[in-house]
Amino acid sequence: MPHFKIIILEDDDFYNGLLSRFVHAVMKELSLEKRFTYELQAYTTYSDCSPNVDATTSLVIADYYLDTGGTPSHLIHLMEKRPSECKVVIMSRQKDAKKELESLLKGTYEFFQKDTTLFNNCRDMIFSIVMLENEN
């Protein structure tokens, strides 16, 4: 039975909670339908998150700008240490960040603007990842 480990790195406690509850709801529904297990970990600091990205991590959803001490160079380090199968999704409120991120964070699976489309984009992306894994 496939297992998915998802890590959320968002320094805003409120937004972290919203996103975590949403991802949990999506994964719970999908896991019943597609027969897999999952775990969800949420962190507000890079220093707490980084040691937990390991060979079992399937997906990291990370805020690009962390007020709690994380910097773009920290995300680059996270990208370099992740297992090759782990997908990293970057979120940002900055409207112009996508071009900067595309050149800076090669290997990012997806970039999402933190706007009204974020939750739908996350749901669709998670569904795609689960479907792809279930085909293998």
Image (tube, rainbow, N blue to C red):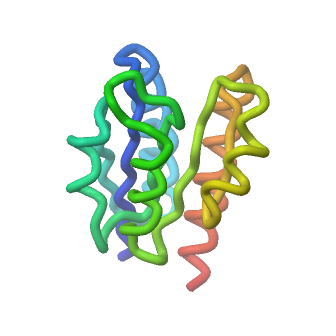
- Split into 4 quadrants, where in the image is the C terminus? bottom right
| Front residue of 105 and 56 | 105
The residue most toward the top is 14
Residue 112 lies, in percent from the top left, at 68, 39
Q: Is residue 129 left or right of residue 103?
A: left
Residue 119 vs 116, above or below: the answer is: below
Residue for point 27% across, 45% down = 49
The residue most toward the bottom is 136
Residue 47 vs 21, above or below: the answer is: below
| Front residue of 117 and 50 | 50
Residue 16 lies, in percent from the top left, at 40, 25
- Split into 4 quadrants, where in the image is the N terminus? bottom left
Residue 25 vs 68, above or below: the answer is: below
Q: Is residue 119 left or right of residue 74?
A: right
Marks counted in the figure total 0
| Front residue of 134 and 63 | 63
Locate residue 58: give its quadrant: bottom left
Residue for point 71% across, 56% down = 103
Residue for point 46% across, 36% down = 25
Q: Is residue 97 left or right of residue 14?
A: right
Residue 17 lies, in percent from the top left, at 38, 22
Residue for point 43% across, 68% down = 80
